[in-house]
Amino acid sequence: MKKKDIEQNKNILETHYKKTFEKLQLELEKKKELLREYLTETKKQANNLSKDNKMIDFFKIKNEYYYLKKDTVLPENIVKSVEQLKREIQSYYIMNYIQFYDILFIDTLGEIFYTLKKQADYQKNIFSSDLDKYKISEKLKSRPFESFVDYQFYDISGETSAFFIEPVIDKEKQIGWFVLQLTSNSINSILTSDDNMDKTEETILVNKEHYMLTNSRFSIDNTILTKKLSKENIESKFKEGKGEKIVIDYRDKEVLSVFEVIKFFDSEWLLISKIDKNEVLSGFYAENKNYLFNILENELSKNKTISLTHIKNKDSVISVNMDEYKRIDTTEIIFTQGVSTCTAIAIVLPGKFAYLAHISPFDAIYKDKKTDIIKDLLKKISYFEITESQKELLEFKIMSTKTYSLELLIDKLITNGYNLNQIKILINNKSDFGNIYSNLKTNQTYVNWRTINNHTDISSQDFKDAENLETILMNNCMN
């Protein structure tokens, strides 16, 4: 390809990257605004508590009752009155402060003399040895007024929690704090909502210690404060404050990302919106396939077959006929022969299964309507064989002597959510037909190319030596 053509392709790809960054920025702005609204409203509710006379009166009564009960046997009528007041406060909490997981009533001595949940921190001292490991203990030791304690795993409740600290003032004197416990559930829900997101798009929140404060879209395991991201990736973003980068993410995937530092009280978080580069490049192909397919076609049509190598199978094999597909597991070998004007495709999940299809020119990938084998096969695999997260693990290995079917076949795969880096194609227009074999035990899929005259192998190719379509395009758009 001429240098000017490569430069033109590079410019078009960079324009596509720019559009992707702009889309990610819109998503980040949307999530940032939702986060801001949530934090503002939650802070407002916390502030309201410090002015809530009903709660302040209860704080004073319960604090006095806590110490009296330690030293005195109280009259039954007083005990009943306090118990009734506690029930009223529980109902009042549900009506007014239910967004907080718990509210701790703590006096200036550090005594947690009341909590709504009455968990293991109830009637303990926040400065004692078994509680002083928490950030809330360290913060209260500094005698704060209004404050916020960043997210930490709080073993008492088994929840990742942050805390709002609100002073309790009586006659212009501070007598303690309301400490409002806020779990990470709401923030996680806001940021991980995937409405209108692309397949691999994700927005995450990261703290200064490089830990995720949200759950991954791509893992069934909890990642909140358990998944630590790379230092070089996160620290540079905190320093820059805002921007866009192409980086390797926590899944070891190359991604396009936009980011911004979010400040709340003394806390700083990194908000990141990102998408896999593989998906972006497949989208680039789909938007520009009128000329990008020509690049692929030209590259694939070049004679790249290797020297004759006889590859023989002594094991029994499962044979696939034309207009048919079959499945094997790791104990079997599958093959089809006589692929000439037809197309063969092996769909492989390494170590698990493989399907092999022999598709005739009467199929939809040849613009005919008699069969649509790829549609049926992809539907079967998606329904019975894999989860959504396993789609990226599938390998598509396509062979033919001609390129007639390839454009529509690639379209079908991309439309169904697969990417160019999952697709490899072998073409040999100097052969009359080919036979394709797939052996899961050796993780080998290869083609023996033949001629009609002598029916002997003229060459052999293993798909492991072929470049995937993404690599072919990138070599012609960026190099």
Image: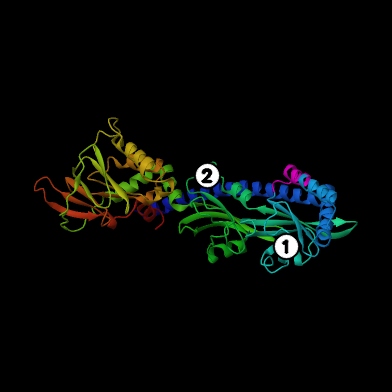
Which secondary structure type mostly characterizes the magenta part of the structure? Answer: helix
In 3D space, how far apart are the residues under numbered discs 1 and 2 (Cα atoms)? 46 Å
Q: How many marks?
A: 2
- The residue at the point 8 percent across, 48 percent down is 454
Q: Position of residue 373 (x, y in %)?
A: 30, 37
**In magenta stretch: residue 98:** yes
**Outermost residue, left direction?**
454
Q: Amino acid at mark 2?
A: Met
- The residue at the point 55 percent across, 49 percent down is 24
Q: Characterize the local packing of mark 1: few (<14), some (14-19) or many (20 or more) Cα atoms within 10 angstroms.
A: some
- The quarter in which the C terminus is drawn is bottom left
Q: Nearer the viewer, residue 6 or 382?
A: 382
Residue 127 to residue 53: above or below: below
Determine if residue 428 is in view: no
Q: Which residue is mark 2?
A: 197
Q: Nearer the viewer, residue 61 or 177?
A: 61
Q: Position of residue 273 (x, y in %)?
A: 56, 52
Residue 126 to residue 40: above or below: below
Q: Characterize the local packing of mark 2: few (<14), some (14-19) or many (20 or more) Cα atoms within 10 angstroms.
A: some
From the viewer's perspective, tell me whether residue 474 is left or right of residue 319.
Answer: right
Secondary structure of the residue carrying tag 1 is loop
- The residue at the point 81 percent across, 52 percent down is 50
From the viewer's perspective, tell me whether residue 268 is left or right of residue 281.
Answer: right
Q: Which residues are magenta?
A: 88-99
Q: Which residue is mark 1?
A: 124
Secondary structure of the residue carrying tag 2 is loop
Q: Amino acid at mark 1?
A: Lys
